[in-house]
Image (cartoon, helix red, strand yellow):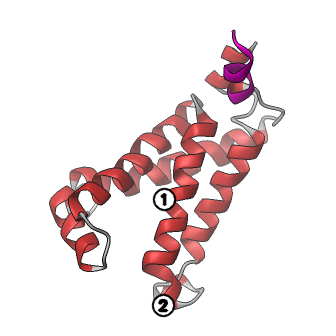
């Protein structure tokens, strides 16, 4: 296996990161399913795209597709433990955009629409980007 690919898949993280990775991945998948498919009370691509357009993220449909795909497929990658670092990078970017385009003006607390939830999800994603998928992952098995 080539060195750049092996460095993407390699991890020094232990078993504990697995729980964090899987639960965070399922959370992202649920949010992505809201945006992409209208599941769990979401508005689907058309509705999410209209909303994104209304807050200045244009073209709204494309932005909804990108955000929903990053969350759903990035979350799926976290759950199965495959290509976790690239997925985590996409999720960090998505959360930074969410914080500054949607939540920043409302302050810290989620009860006021603030950025605390997006910040925590972004920080977990950044941790996975740095540490890798952990021992119980496809990345770890492929790197060996």
Say few, some or many: other residues with alpha carbon within 10 Å of mark 1 (under 14 / 14 to 19 / 20 or more): some
Q: Position of residue 137 (x, y in %)?
A: 65, 27
Judge from the rendering whether residue 18 lies leftward or rightward of residue 84; answer left or right.
right
Give the left or right position of residue 63, taking residue 82 as reference.
Answer: left
Residue shown at 66%/21% (left/top)?
Answer: 5
**Mark 1 or mark 2: which comes first in sequence?**
1
Q: Nearer the viewer, mark 1 or mark 2?
A: 1
Q: Is residue 130 left or right of residue 23?
A: right
For the stretch drawn in magenta, the main secondary structure is helix
Separation of disc 1 and disc 2 at Cα? Answer: 20 Å
Q: Residue at x 31, y 59 (%)?
A: 63
Task: Find residue 53 and report its horizontal and vertical position in percent.
Answer: 24, 72
Q: Which residue is the extreme one toward the left? A: 46
Residue 140 visible in rendering: no
Q: Nearer the viewer, residue 63 or 115?
A: 63
- Image-quadrant location for residue 123: bottom right
**Is residue 3 shown above or below 9?**
above
Identity of the residue drawn at 48% across and 47% down: 26
Per the image, the residue denoted by label 2 is 112
Bounds of the magenta segment = 1-8
Q: Quadrant of the N terminus?
A: top right
Residue 2, how many percent across, how many down?
70, 12
Q: Is residue 86 above or below residue 49?
A: above
Q: Quadrant of residue 52?
A: bottom left
Residue denoted by label 1? 94
For label 2, count other residues whose C-alpha is less than 10 Å away and answer few (under 14), some (14-19) or many (20+): few
Image quadrant holding the C terminus, namely top right
Q: Report the side of 102 relative to 89 (left or right).
A: left
Question: Magenta stretch: residue 138 in it?
Answer: no
Secondary structure at badge 2 equals helix
**Could you tell me which secondary element the residue under label 1 belongs to?**
helix
Task: Name the residue rendered at 21%, 59% in the picture.
Answer: 61
């Amino acid at each position: 296996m080539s060195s750049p690919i092996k460095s993407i898949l390699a991890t020094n993280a232990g078993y504990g990161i697995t729980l964090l990775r899987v639960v965070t991945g399922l959370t992202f998948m649920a949010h992505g399913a809201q945006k992409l498919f209208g599941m769990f009370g979401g508005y689907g691509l058309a509705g999410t795209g209209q909303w994104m357009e209304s807050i200045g993220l244009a073209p709204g449909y494309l932005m909804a597709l990108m955000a929903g795909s990053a969350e759903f497929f990035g979350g799926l990658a976290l759950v199965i433990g495959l290509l976790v670092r690239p997925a985590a990078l996409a999720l960090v970017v998505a959360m930074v955009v969410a914080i500054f385009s949607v939540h920043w003006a409302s302050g810290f607390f989620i009860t006021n629409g603030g950025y605390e939830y997006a910040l925590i999800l972004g920080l977990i994603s950044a941790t996975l980007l740095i540490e890798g998928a952990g021992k119980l992952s496809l990345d770890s098995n492929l790197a060996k």
